[in-house]
Structures are given as C-alpha cells and as structure tokens.
Amino acid sequence: MDRRVPVVMCLAAWWVGAAAMAQAAAISPSDVRLWAASCAACHGPHGKAEGAGMYLAGVSTDKLYKRLLEFKQGTRHATIMHQHAKGYSDPELQALAEHFSKIK
C-alpha cells in the first residue's frame, strides 16, 4: 500500500475539521443577536413567550440545540420551525441555542 494514502487521508480529515471550526469561530455575537431577534414574533422578546410560542429563555443549550436539529432534520414537526431551522448551519443553530440559554 502506498504510504501517501494515510497521510493524505489524515490531512483531509484535519482540513474538514479545521474548516468546521473556522465557520463556528466566524459567528459574531451581533449576528446571533440579529438572528435571535427574528424569533421574537413567535417566541417573544428575548425568548420570553407569552402565549402559544415556546419559552426559549433559560432553556439549556443542549435541549434547544437538539430541538433545532430535529426541526432541521424533519424529525420534529411544527408549523414553521422546520423551515426556519433549515436556513441555518449546525454551528449557527448551536450559537442560537447558547444565546437563548444565557437569558435569565
């Protein structure tokens, strides 16, 4: 077996991981606040729903992120959330989940 193959495979794996980390690092707090503001129509200002929308403020990052991924993947059904979630990358959904989890 050619010795270059494992080296090339390792470099490719590193590059994919580095690209994903760079994308996650490129998300600015102002971007997250802007995205979160669009959630207010259903989830209330700062994720504090008063009515039918789910309360987002203070919910754990893991729980929110899991739900957002489920909407994105189509395994959790809703009237509109599955469409919203598909518009974001996984790191962006993670950033949104972290944002709402920090609100008291």
Image (cartoon, rainbow, N blue to C red):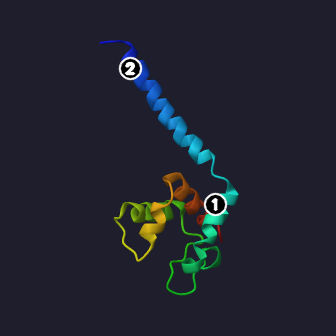
Q: Residues within 10 Å of mark 1 (few under 14, many from 20)?
A: some
Q: x, y percentage for residue 45?
A: 64, 78
> x and y percent of residue 14 in the render?
49, 30
The answer to whether residue 102 of the structure is visible from this angle is no
* Secondary structure type for disc 1: helix
Residue linked to disc 1: 32
In this rendering, the answer to whether 15 lies above or below 27 is: above
The image position of residue 5, as x and y in percent, is: 37, 18
* Quarter of the N terminus within the rendering: top left
For badge 1, the amino acid type reads Val
Image quarter of residue 61: bottom right
Extreme-bottom residue of the structure: 51
Specify whether residue 8 is in view: yes
For image coordinates 45% across by 61% down, the residue present is 86
Residue sitting at 61 percent across and 65 percent down?
A: 35
Q: Which mark is residue 2?
A: none
Which residue occupies the extreme top position in the image? 2
Mark 2 element type: helix
At horizontal 39% and vertical 63% (from top left) the residue drawn is: 70
Q: Is residue 37 left or right of residue 93?
A: right
- Locate residue 92: give its quadrant: bottom right
> Which corner quadrant holds the C terminus?
bottom right
User: Image height check: is 11 above or below 28?
Assistant: above
Q: Identify residue for label 2.
A: 6
Label 2 crowd (10 A; few <14 / some 14-19 / many >=20): few
Rendered location of residue 82, percent (x, y) = 42, 68
Q: Amino acid at mark 2?
A: Pro
Q: Where 12 sits versus 29, above or below? A: above
Residue at 62% across, 45% down: 25
Say whether disc 2 or disc 1 marks the residue closer to the N-terminus. Answer: 2
Name above or below for residue 83 compared with residue 44: above
Residue 68 left/right relative to 76: right
